[in-house]
Image: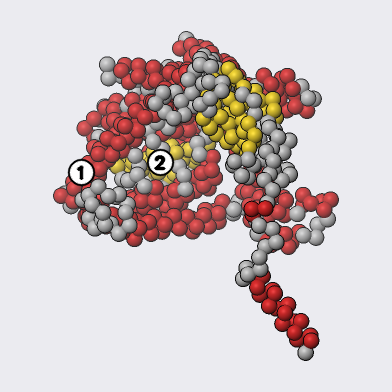
Amino acid sequence: MKRNVPLAITFIVGAVLIFSVFIPPMENWGEDFTLFFDIIAVFAFFLGGGNLLRVHLTKLSRRKQDWPYSIVTIMGFLLMLAAGLFRIGNPGDINASLTEQGSLFQTIYDSVFVPLGSTMYALLAFFVASASYRAFRAKNREATILLVAAFIILLGRTPLGTIVTGWVPESFSILQIPNLAIWIMNSPNLAGQRAIMIGIGLGVVSMSLRLILGIERTYLGGDDK
Amino acid sequence: MRYILIIFSLILITFSAVIGQVDPVVTDSLAPVPAPPAPVTEVAVSDKANDHGHALIIEWKRSLDDGAGSNAVMLYEIFRSEFPDSAFKMVGSVPLGNERFEDIGTIEKESRDYIPDNTNLYYRVDAVTIDPVVRTSSEVYGPVQSYSNWFHKGRVPVLTAVLIFGALMVYFVSVARKGTELYVRPLAGIAAVDDAIGRATEMGRPILYILGLGTADMISTIASFTILSRVAKQVAEYQTELIVPCYDPIVMTVAQEVVKSSYLDAGHPDNYKEDSVFYITTNQFAYVAAVNGIMLRDLPATNVYMGKFYAESLILAETGAVAGSIQIAGTDEVGQLPFFIVACDYTLIGEELYAASAYLGREPIMLGSLKAQDYAKAAVIVLMILGLLAINVHLNAFIEIFKVVD
């Protein structure tokens, strides 16, 4: 029963969604199923919040490793929850928009949350540099090809590429570094990406059929027994 | 003195003109009223094909004054009515140069955009100049009806492909069920999962499993659940610690159930810790900060990234590399693959992510579906080559067979 009901739901919903692609009057059914998912997702946020509190309160009460971080998490969670629920500092009344300028919720969001998020994102620049260093070490033939291609594209996207090969006559314009960079991006790179995309498309169809036909059941938990 | 007077006069005239004190020679009231533009011709309305009804296509020949002359047409306004000579309502407009408009309505009767099916409708197209009053209406076209189609003829190639692929799957699954040994090419990334779990056990460190930023309805997240199930089972057998921080509450709920069942299947239900699968946040970079913190504090022996990843992929994988973890990744996000390939020890590329659960399980039925997938790939390669040849010899009939119309 625990297995059969989810399998039946998966089969019916999957079959309906496949039919809806080919039968125009059923087109809206797919959107309706998406709405069901959205409704469930709203309630799932209570689960998420509850789980967050439970995990960190347990950590705090048992004085587990790094428990002081849990205090910060719980305080932040409760402060934002109170600021949003009670509209603390909101210029309007209790019915005013949560994101109204001047409210405590929006102030914390703008002054703390957004800068912290941007800081994390900014780390990407340094990680790109360190990853590039590792990838472009010409250890073998593949890495050497990668290095050369990357070097051409880097040069091609800067004015230096134009300056260095600007003298190449128009009849050999493909040898100008900016054009070479465009060719690498539009031909070998795009061809490779499309090959992966075709594989992904087939993989998605295969996986979907396995799920609809009940061949793939591990997502229901454990082995099929 | 005379020159000074002339220069002074010129400056005075210029200044007067600039500040607008010089009266215009021609006033607005004397401007000629532009003649109405030439009307659009050959108006034709037809039902939109391959849809659920409530939509029509209006086509016409442009006005002769389209974008030219003093009475240039600037846009075309389309009107609809249920009567041939009255109650016309504007349903849309298109800029000059256009000869087509799709009047797509809704199915809801209460909506303003509702278009009734199987009802006589009449259309006219107005050619409108820059002055909205100056316009010319076309002749009324009608009656015409919209109706629903029961089959999308434009998607016949897709249906054929799905049916062939489905038949291949059924065939290979039945072959596998009969006990025939099926060979599928090995995947280094999958083979590494066992070694990585063994390494974590030897080092006494946890395994970190990241399901990505996808929601539970994404196929890559579902594929990740299946891999998590296998990993959790092995982790339970080796009695290693598993950490699964989640980005989405629904994903967390499913992941908890998957891990719990895997521990049960492995015969170690008591070793399952409820806190091993937990929710962090549904904000991309806050999630990354939390996971990076776990990596640097707990120093997991193995990091497994499977699912949907975006800009956070490199931040996570590089932090894992700094922490000295063995890293295995898999995603169907083409843009993130290079980052994982650079920063991880093994990467499952695209469809390998979906195949991983079958490889891990080695169940004949699952391998049968993989075999079908491999044959489909071979068929695609052959068709691509044939298509390339056909397009070069202008064999358009062959290309038309595969054309999908939305």
Quick check: B1 left or right of B85? right
Q: Residue at the spot x=46%, y=29% of the render?
A: B113
User: How are the colours assigned in the image?
Assistant: secondary structure
Indicate whether A93 appears above or below B169.
below
Indicate whether A34 appears above or below A154.
above
Amino acid at dot 1: Arg
Q: Count residues near mark 1 (Cα–Cα under 10 Å), then give few for <14, some for 14-19, many for 20+.
A: some
Helix, strand or loop at label 1? It is helix
Q: Outermost residue toward the top?
A: B178
Discs 1 and 2 lie in a common subunit: no
Quick check: A110 left or right of B77? left
x, y percentage for residue A139? 60, 51
Q: Residue at the spot x=64%, y=25% of the render?
A: B139
For the question of whether residue B328 can be seen, the reply is no
Q: Chain of mark 2?
A: B
Q: Residue at the spot x=53%, y=17% of the render?
A: B120
Q: Chain of mark 1?
A: A
Structural distance between the alpha carbons of marks 1 and 2: 22 Å
B185 and A93: which one is in front? A93
Which numbered tag is attached to residue A54?
A: 1
Q: Count residues near mark 2 (Cα–Cα under 10 Å), then give few for <14, some for 14-19, many for 20+.
A: many
x, y percentage for residue A55? 22, 44
Q: Quadrant of residue B213?
A: top left
Q: Quadrant of the C terminus of chain A?
A: top left
Helix, strand or loop at label 2? It is loop
Q: Outermost residue toward the left?
A: A61
x, y percentage for residue B299? 35, 50
* Residue that label 2 marks: B213
x, y percentage for residue A122? 45, 58
Amino acid at dot 2: Leu
